[in-house]
Image (cartoon, helix red, strand yellow):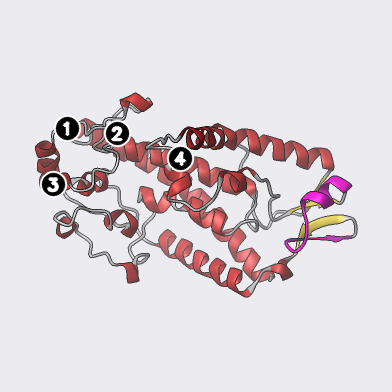
């Protein structure tokens, strides 16, 4: 298990050259099992319907994910190697220690951090719901509309059975970026009225997509949040993506994906159990993000 994320308000420490290089190496080894296969697939002109999502939907490159930054409370001893890696304008040297320069936080970045903080806090305050059972992926292919992975993975049930399931189950999606891909005929079935202008107003901490987006809010706030927290959010997003696609209508067994059959009571129970467990992890990471983003804004 990874070490717990330190609070943004932990006592400041200074990492030696050997310490930060070891941390940077460990971070690279942690994310490389995802970044390197991504590069290799791109070189071959191939795609992975599950794992490539975190590099396509989210606008953070593999190279940026691999690049390590210290936590907010950590400084770096100003060795030659450190000066070459941790440079202005983000970092500054003072009394032999390299730290982030909060004065380098631009007005636009500060505004972005403010928006991130507002979304994180508002989502945290809402009641968590766990009754969606992953129906969003099914609503997307309702009526045979836009079967996105048809080229690499067939549907695992006949279209008629998929349509019947969507019509028989409550559709309760609270995440606009999932809802907007619903088949047109499925959109009126959703219990929540969602729109672009108010897309964050229904975000709630039980939603797997809202929790996956913690990775978005972490990398949007880099380097101010540090790579340890970023990597934790990435790992959570990958686990959520796995559940998302395991519960979907696609037959992904060729990619090593075992279905969670939400068309059955047992499958729905498994989905909700795992969704709740992942939401606990998300609650902890959301609290850490709120802490470090608020500190970055307050310090600027």
Give the residues drawn in magenta, as a range: 80-94
The mark that comes first in sequence, 4 or 1, is 1
- Foreground: disc 4 or disc 2: 4
**Disc 3/disc 2 C-alpha distance (Å):** 26 Å
Image height of 239 relative to 189, above or below: above
Would you call the spot at circle 4 few (<14 residues within 10 Å), some (14-19), or many (20 or more)?
many
Q: Earlier in the sequence, mark 2 or mark 1?
A: 1
The answer to which of marks 4 and 3 sits earlier in the sequence is 3
Residue 92 on the magenta span: yes
> In this orientation, which residue lies closer to the viewer: 173 or 143?
143
Above or below for 99 versus 233: below
Q: Quadrant of residue 297?
A: bottom right
| Secondary structure at numbered mark 1 | loop
Secondary structure under badge 2? helix
Q: Which residue is mark 1?
A: 157
Residue under label 3: 143
Question: Which residue occupies 33% across, 63% down?
Answer: 202
| Residue drawn 77% across the image and 53% down it | 86
Q: Helix, strand or loop at disc 4?
A: helix
Whole-Å distance between the Cαs marked 4 and 3? Answer: 29 Å
Question: Can residue 141 be seen in the rendering of this structure?
Answer: yes
Q: Position of residue 259 (x, y in %)?
A: 29, 29
Identify the residue at image location x=16%, y=44%.
144
In the rendered image, which residue does mark 2 sit on? Answer: 270
Question: From mark 1 to mark 3, how far is it between C-alphas?
Answer: 13 Å
User: Which quarter of the figure is the C terminus placed in?
Assistant: bottom right
Secondary structure of residue under mark 3: helix
Residue topped by disc 4: 238
Of all residues, the one furthest to the right in this rendering is 95
Whole-percent x, y for residue 135 in the image: 23, 45
């Amino acid at each position: 298990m990874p070490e717990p994320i330190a609070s943004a308000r932990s006592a400041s420490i200074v990492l030696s050259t050997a310490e930060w290089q070891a941390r940077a190496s460990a971070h690279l080894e942690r994310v490389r099992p995802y970044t390197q296969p991504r590069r290799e697939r791109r070189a071959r002109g191939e795609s992975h319907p599950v794992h490539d999502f975190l590099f396509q939907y989210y606008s953070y490159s593999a190279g940026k994910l691999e690049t390590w930054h210290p936590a907010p409370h950590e400084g770096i001893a100003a060795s030659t190697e450190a000066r070459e890696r941790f440079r202005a304008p983000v970092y500054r040297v003072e009394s032999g220690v390299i730290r982030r320069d909060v004065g380098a936080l631009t007005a636009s970045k500060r505004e972005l951090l403010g928006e991130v903080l507002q979304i994180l806090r508002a989502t945290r305050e809402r009641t968590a719901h766990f009754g969606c059972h992953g129906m969003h992926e099914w609503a997307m292919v309702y009526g045979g509309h836009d079967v996105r992975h048809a080229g690499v993975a067939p549907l695992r049930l006949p279209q008629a059975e998929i349509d019947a399931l969507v019509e028989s189950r409550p559709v309760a999606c609270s995440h606009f970026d999932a809802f907007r891909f619903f088949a047109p005929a499925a959109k009126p079935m959703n219990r929540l009225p969602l729109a672009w202008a108010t897309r964050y107003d229904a975000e709630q901490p039980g939603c797997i997509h809202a929790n996956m987006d913690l990775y978005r809010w972490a990398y949007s706030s880099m380097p101010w949040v540090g790579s340890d927290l970023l990597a934790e959010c990435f790992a959570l997003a990958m686990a959520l993506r796995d559940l998302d696609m395991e519960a979907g209508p696609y037959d992904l067994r060729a990619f090593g994906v075992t279905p969670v059959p939400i068309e059955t009571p047992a499958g729905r129970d498994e989905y909700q159990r795992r969704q709740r467990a992942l939401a606990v992890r998300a609650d902890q990471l959301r609290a850490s993000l709120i802490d470090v983003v608020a500190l970055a804004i307050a310090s600027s």
